[in-house]
Amino acid sequence: MPVPGHPAGGLKLPVSPPSRLRPPAVDALSIPPRLSIIIPCLNESVRLPRLLNDLAALRKRGHEIIVVDGGSGDGTLEQAAQGADRTLNSPAGRARQMNAGAAAARGDAFWFLHADTRVPRSVPAGVLACLRAGRPWGRCRVRLSGDTLVLRAIAALMNLRSCLTGIATGDQGIFVTRSAFDGVGGFPEIALMEDVAISRALKSGVGRPACIRPCLVTSSRRWEQRGVWRTVLLMWRLRLAYWLGADPAELARRYR
């Protein structure tokens, strides 16, 4: 006989579903390591604010932006003060400026960016994820700001070259842990090819670079101003000469 207040036979009382608590959202940009983003500049008052705007979300989450000026006369430092944590003066020369930024940095890892670079939103999370995975250094894929077929082909060749050689260039956004950077003595303070030189040292010391698949956008002005094929051939000749032992100061003169 059914007991009052109890279900009879196979009758099932409705059961409230268990509450589903959503885990708190994880902000990938706020998880350590802390980046020090180091930007060497010389007369980049027009382009630098665009890059600083791209990096504003990182800055809000505790990462550090350092702009190192090499003697600009166009108001670059005034522009930098509006979007950077620190602005420094340094003797001109990309290697000197980047080393000065690293010496002043407080982060666990350094990310070196050219002032005419643009940083899409997906790139910083990729850099941080790579560092959290234990990779001591790496670089990003790039695409050029121009939209012609030949510029797209040049960017593809740049990415392929870096994959094959394990050598990164400055426009690919080299990132490196503080310990790995200190371990190779920073950038050699040479007039040109400092990015190739530190890549060779890091590759020998800690292994090949990691590669971030989301692309940085690097300015195509060098190719557009000097001529696409002329610039490609010039860079090939300069790199070959460097590998053969040419003086970087002479290479810099030829580049300019």
Image (spheres, rainbow, N blue to C red):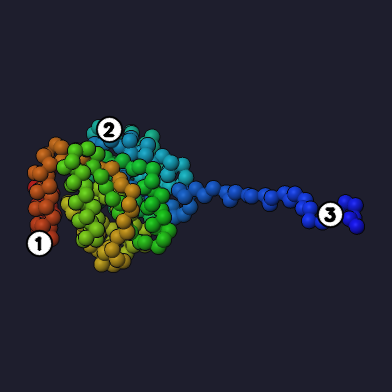
The spot of residue 13 in percent (x, y) is 77, 51
**Residue in view at x 58 percent, y 51 percent:** 23
- Disc 3 to disc 2, C-alpha distance: 80 Å
**Residue in view at x 46 percent, y 54 percent:** 32
Say which quarter of the image contains residue 187.
Answer: bottom left
Say which quarter of the image contains residue 151.
Answer: top left
Which of 126/14 is in front? 14
Crowding at dot 2, Cα within 10 Å, few <14 / some 14-19 / many 20+, comes out as few
**Residue in view at x 54 percent, y 48 percent:** 25
Residue named by callout 2: 46
SS of the residue under disc 1: loop
Q: Quick check: 199 above or below 219?
A: below
Residue named by callout 3: 8
Say which quarter of the image contains residue 161.
Answer: bottom left
Which of 121/69 is in front? 121
The spot of residue 176 in percent (x, y) is 34, 57
- Residue 97 showing in the rendered view: no
The amino acid sitting under disc 1 is Leu
The amino acid sitting under disc 2 is Val
Crowding at dot 3, Cα within 10 Å, few <14 / some 14-19 / many 20+, comes out as few
Q: Is label 1 or label 3 in front?
A: 3
- Residue 119 showing in the rendered view: yes
- Disc 2 to disc 1, C-alpha distance: 37 Å
Left or right of 101 in this view: 195: left
Q: Are marks 2 and 1 in contact (CB under 8 Å)?
A: no
SS of the residue under disc 2: loop
Residue named by callout 1: 244
Reading the chain from its start, which is encountered first: label 1 or label 3? Answer: 3
Reading the chain from its start, which is encountered first: label 3 or label 2? Answer: 3
The amino acid sitting under disc 3 is Ala
Which of 15/155 is in front? 15
Which of 232/67 is in front? 232
